[in-house]
Image (cartoon, grey):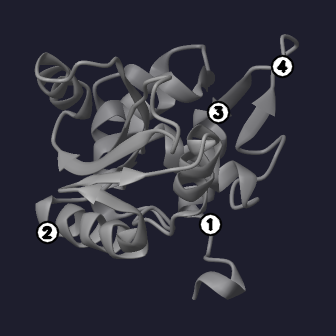
């Protein structure tokens, strides 16, 4: 489940864009469903991945409460003209469930190892591919990098073309390492 932030914008709106804060199992499909009845183009600004529906409901409610003074109608909120950076900053700073690997994440990686996925000669993959393999959201991966939970040149690397690559072996070493003092 995800909490999503979808922007609706029209140049005729002098007070800025509207942002829908909702929850869905498939945010992109939900945005397409919303687009059918919306006279302006919608844009997905980002998502917060949640473990389950209960956590998604809690996170969605917290976001609605945070922006209650901006509520336009229903789950739509008024934002400044700089809504994209405001929402993306909010998402990047969100304290989500992915602060430590969970048993289900480790089990999923173990299953991939058993099926031979990690027996490839490729150790480093893009954030997008690692998200697909591990079950971490791209946001969670980027948060671990930005907060220095995952160390540069150990778990993640800059490729010559400046793309960020995640080391599968580096990640496995991080999972098996003792928690840092602040994580206890």
Residue 1 in sight from this viewpoint: no
Residue under circle 4? 162
Going from N to C along the chain, the mark reached first, 2 or 3, is 2
Q: 98 and 181: which one is in front?
A: 98
Q: 144 and 86: which one is in front?
A: 86
Residue under circle 1? 177
Per the model, the C-alpha gap separating discs 1 and 3 is: 17 Å
How many numbered tags mark residues here?
Answer: 4
Q: Is residue 131 above or below residue 98?
A: above
Kindly identify which numbered label has been placed on residue 36: none
How many neighbours does mark 2 have within 10 angstroms: few (below 14), some (14-19), or many (20 or more)? few
Q: Is residue 169 above or below residue 59?
A: above
Residue under circle 2? 54
How far across and how far down the image is residue 137, in percent? 42, 42
Going from N to C along the chain, the mark reached first, 2 or 1, is 2
In contact (CB < 8 Å): disc 4 and disc 2: no
Residue 178 in sight from this viewpoint: yes
Q: Nearer the viewer, mark 2 or mark 3?
A: 2
Going from N to C along the chain, the mark reached first, 4 or 2, is 2
Looking at this view, name the residue that lies furthest to the right.
Answer: 160
């Amino acid at each position: 489940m995800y909490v999503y932030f979808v922007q609706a914008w029209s140049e005729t709106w002098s007070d800025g864009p509207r942002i829908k804060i909702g929850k869905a199992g498939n945010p992109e499909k939900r945005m397409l469903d919303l687009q059918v009845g919306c006279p302006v183009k919608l844009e997905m600004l980002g998502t917060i991945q949640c473990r389950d529906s209960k956590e998604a409901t809690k996170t969605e409610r917290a976001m609605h409460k945070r922006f209650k003074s901006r509520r336009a109608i229903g789950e739509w909120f008024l934002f400044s003209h700089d809504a994209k950076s405001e929402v993306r900053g909010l998402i990047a700073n969100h304290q989500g469930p992915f602060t430590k690997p969970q048993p289900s994440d480790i089990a999923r990686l173990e299953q991939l190892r058993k099926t031979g996925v990690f027996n490839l000669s490729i150790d480093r993959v893009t954030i997008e591919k690692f998200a697909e393999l591990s079950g971490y959201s791209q946001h969670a991966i980027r948060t671990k990098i930005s907060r220095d939970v995952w160390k540069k040149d150990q778990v993640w690397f800059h490729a010559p073309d400046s793309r960020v690559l995640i080391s599968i072996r580096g990640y496995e070493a991080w999972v098996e390492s003792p928690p840092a003092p602040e994580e206890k």
